[in-house]
Image (cartoon, grey):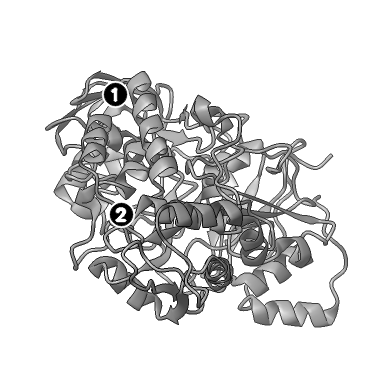
């Protein structure tokens, strides 16, 4: 029997019910678990509006009750090591950049006992062509890699995908995002995105227990193909919690797993002896200077700004010091230290706060300080910048405050304007801005995650918001990213990634500020093996987290 944090006072119970939308009403104790198993973990509902909602477990429906635990992907990307962990596929190969061969695991069965085969994988991928709403990986589209032209199961254990051109950048989403569904069930229903799946027969580690309109229980399958991987007997999904109600639930022991934004988790939850947290870097929050406008079009000016911003103070103000200042390489440190190019291993590639160096760089580039304490451009014209920040984004506003004070101290005339987030998006699309905050994805498809932020084809033209928010243009980088996308050779990929990292470090098209978090707050009373600084592992996929957990001894 799992322990709980302690007695809950009547007043706390009332408060918790109100804050949590009375999610605990009607809760029955979880059945006893076998020895060596965790009896229950309580997670937030995956669909906040599941009360009285349609009971549907189709992972391609707009709002499945769970998209995590019943149907599985082919592989799972470890976002720290960037290795692909075999799952329903045991491996893959690229005979040439236009052909992907997937090795499909044998000995796996669907929940109704029918064998899972490569034909189910080919069916799922081909259904995404017929019904584009299911194409979560962009398999049949043009974005970052050529579109597929054919998907076939050459036998029960092999799927071959042929593309119209090089398509290495599509691999990650194909194997990590697409959930494989059974052809013998979904094949009879027409559009797989509209099929109502009330009796799921997935390959996943759990099967549906009960759903009462508020609470969904999932019970561990005893015949799962990884029989010893999952030691949690029952998962209960209930309630949708904001930061305050989530923290309250965690402290009370009514919630075991939470990934929402709880500010200052050290004070709000970790001081409770039964609750802890692990915030790992998901990507990099950056300052995006407009590379098409003077003076932020000048690499020397951008570099000076980078040295002139106190990222340590910024991190303390914006994230209560939970997140660290970020490396200008855009590599997530320290969890990806092994992936950092050798030339940056010694110092991590940080552009650390050095206002004297920043001032010298501005002086050397001709940005002279006037008698009024403000700098002018090399042509003597005044400089005046507007920094647009989304109103209501508390962490962004805290960053903006530090940045503006630091840059003013360098003699740069700058003012911060907090405006509607939609207005900031409109500025990104139109290019009508001087500076704003943005994000560089810390994923492992670096041709897209790093290259996409730099290629001219990803500069918005007014209607669509594309990746290259800073509007950086460099024909050499365009050619580099095209080469990167075209190769499946891992040594060449590493070389191209290193060249992109050099651009970020030397040209400073974006200024790295602090790492953006991938959050997990958890109840240590329920299970052991949670991630920590001493035991780090990626937390973006619960399917990958739970095999690390074991009962508290």
- In the picture, measured across the screen, residue 419 lies left or right of residue 134, that is right
Q: Is residue 114 visible?
A: no
Residue 467's tag is 2
- In the picture, measured across the screen, residue 254 lies left or right of residue 214, that is right
Of all residues shown, which one is farthest toward the front? Answer: 371
Instruction: State which tag comes first along the sequence, 1 or 2.
Output: 2
Residue named by callout 1: 488
The residue drawn where x is 52% and y is 49% is: 282
Residue 35 image position (x, y, % from top left): 77, 37
Q: How far is mark 1 from mark 2, CA to CA?
A: 23 Å
Quarter where residue 471 is shown: bottom left
The residue drawn where x is 21% and y is 35% is: 479
Please tell me how crowded label 1 is: few (under 14), some (14-19), or many (20+) other residues with Cα within 10 Å: some
If the image is split into quadrants, where does the C terminus sit? top right
Of all residues shown, which one is farthest toward the top? Answer: 95
- In the picture, measured across the screen, residue 94 lies left or right of residue 512, that is left
15 lies above or below 310: below
The residue drawn where x is 38% and y is 71% is: 383
């Amino acid at each position: 029997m799992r322990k709980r944090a302690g007695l809950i006072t009547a007043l706390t119970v009332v408060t918790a019910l109100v804050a949590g939308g009375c999610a605990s009403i009607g809760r029955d104790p979880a059945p006893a678990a076998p020895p060596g198993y965790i009896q229950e973990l309580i997670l937030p509902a995956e669909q906040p509006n599941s009360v009285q909602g349609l009971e549907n477990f189709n992972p391609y429906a707009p709002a499945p009750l769970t998209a995590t635990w019943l149907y599985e992907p082919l592989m799972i990307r470890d976002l720290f090591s960037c290795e692909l962990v075999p799952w329903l596929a045991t491996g893959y190969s690229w005979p040439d950049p236009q052909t992907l061969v997937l090795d499909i695991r044998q000995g796996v069965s669907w929940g109704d006992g029918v064998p899972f085969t490569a034909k189910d994988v080919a069916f799922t991928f081909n259904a995404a062509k017929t019904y584009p709403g299911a194409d979560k990986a962009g398999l049949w589209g043009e974005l970052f890699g050529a579109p597929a032209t054919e998907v076939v199961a050459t036998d029960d254990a092999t799927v071959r995908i042929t593309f119209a051109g090089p398509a290495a950048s599509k691999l990650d989403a194909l194997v990590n995002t697409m959930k494989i569904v059974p052809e013998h069930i979904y094949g009879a229903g027409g559009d797989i995105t509209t099929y109502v799946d009330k009796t799921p027969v997935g390959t996943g580690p759990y099967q549906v227990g009960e759903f009462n309109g508020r609470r969904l229980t999932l019970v561990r399958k005893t015949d799962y193909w990884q029989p010893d991987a999952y030691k949690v007997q029952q998962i209960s999904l209930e309630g949708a919690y904001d930061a305050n109600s989530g923290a309250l639930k965690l402290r009370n022991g009514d919630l075991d797993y939470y990934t929402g934004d709880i500010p200052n988790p050290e004070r709000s939850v970790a001081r409770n002896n039964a609750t802890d947290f692990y915030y790992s870097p998901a990507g990099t929050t950056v300052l995006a200077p407009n590379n098409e406008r003077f003076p932020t079009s000048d690499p020397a000016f951008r570099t000076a700004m980078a040295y002139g911003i106190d990222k340590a103070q910024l991190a303390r103000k914006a994230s209560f010091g939970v997140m660290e200042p970020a490396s200008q390489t855009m590599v997530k440190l320290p969890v990806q230290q092994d992936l950092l190019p050798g030339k940056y291993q010694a110092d991590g590639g940080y552009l650390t706060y050095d206002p004297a160096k920043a001032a010298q760089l501005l002086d050397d580039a001709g940005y002279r300080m006037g008698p009024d304490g403000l700098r002018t451009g090399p042509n003597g014209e005044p400089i005046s910048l507007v920094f647009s920040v989304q109103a209501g984004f508390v962490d962004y506003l805290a960053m903006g405050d530090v940045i503006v004070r630091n840059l003013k101290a360098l003699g740069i005339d700058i003012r911060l304007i907090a405006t509607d987030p939609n207005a900031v998006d409109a500025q990104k699309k139109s290019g009508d801005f001087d500076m704003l905050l943005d994000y560089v994805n810390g994923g492992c498809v670096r041709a897209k995650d790093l290259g996409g932020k730099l290629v001219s084809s990803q500069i918005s033209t007014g209607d669509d918001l594309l990746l290259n928010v800073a509007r950086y243009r460099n024909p050499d980088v365009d050619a580099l990213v095209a080469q990167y996308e075209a190769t499946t050779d891992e040594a060449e990929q590493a070389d191209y990634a290193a060249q992109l990292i050099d651009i970020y470090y030397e040209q400073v098209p974006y200024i790295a500020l602090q790492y953006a978090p991938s959050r997990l707050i958890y109840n240590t009373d329920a299970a052991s093996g949670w991630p920590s600084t001493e035991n780090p592992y990626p937390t973006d996929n619960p399917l990958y987290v739970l095999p690390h957990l074991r009962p508290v001894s």
